Amino acid sequence: MRVSARADYAVRAALQLAAHRDAGPLKAEAIAEAQEIPHKFLEGILNDMRRGGLVTSQRGGRGGYRLARAAEAISIADVIRVVDGPLVSVRGVRPPELGYTGPAESLLPLWIALRANVRQILDGVSLADVASGALPPGVAELCRDETAWTNP
């Protein structure tokens, strides 16, 4: 699985908003500077997140962006889906819509299992979890595996 720059930036922007939830709206410029995200690129991402119901915006001198709901109620998967679409696809097609024959026939269940695992992890981790540094136990356990970021 590949996490796009757009998805990475969106999650980072959402985490910045989660960390400043009680401080009022944050301007896009402040988010961009804090997370080292190109401002123009971030504006497009924030607009997608607004249309997707994850953030609200307020105009004016005291305007900016804020999360539309509590950080505990927004999963990492929610953010990625809003800016990038489905979490896992094969050639741009969701696994249940694929079909294979011959020796590749059992490839479909593999893609579905991959999709289920990615969804389980990303749907199970909220912005609040990441912002607080307290990942769910199952995710934290996966991170402790020494081979998680090394090539086999």
Image: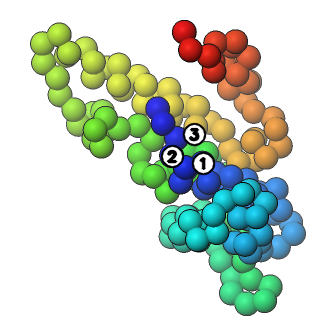
Query: Decide: marks 2, 1 in contact (CB < 8 A)?
Result: yes
The kind of residue on which mark 3 rests is Asp
Q: Is residue 101 above or below residue 63?
A: above
Residue drawn at point x = 68 percent, y = 87 percent = 59
Q: Position of residue 131 (x, y in %)?
A: 79, 46
Q: Is residue 55 above or below residue 139?
A: below
> Between marks 2 and 1, how big is the CA–CA gap?
6 Å
Secondary structure state at the residue bearing disc 3? helix
Q: Quadrant of residue 31?
A: bottom right
Which residue position holds label 3?
Answer: 123
Residue 138 visible to an observer of this rendering: no
Q: In this orientation, which residue lies closer to the viewer: 34 or 127?
A: 34
Q: Which mark is residue 8?
A: 1
> Between marks 3 and 2, how big is the CA–CA gap?
17 Å
- Residue that lies at the very extreme toward the left in this rendered image: 102
Which residue position holds label 2?
Answer: 4
Q: Earlier in the sequence, mark 3 or mark 1?
A: 1
Q: Quadrant of residue 38?
A: bottom right
- Residue that lies at the very extreme toward the right in this rendered image: 23
Residue drawn at point x = 41 percent, y = 22 percent = 113
Query: Decide: marks 3, 2 in contact (CB < 8 A)?
Result: no
Q: Is residue 136 left or right of residue 85?
A: right
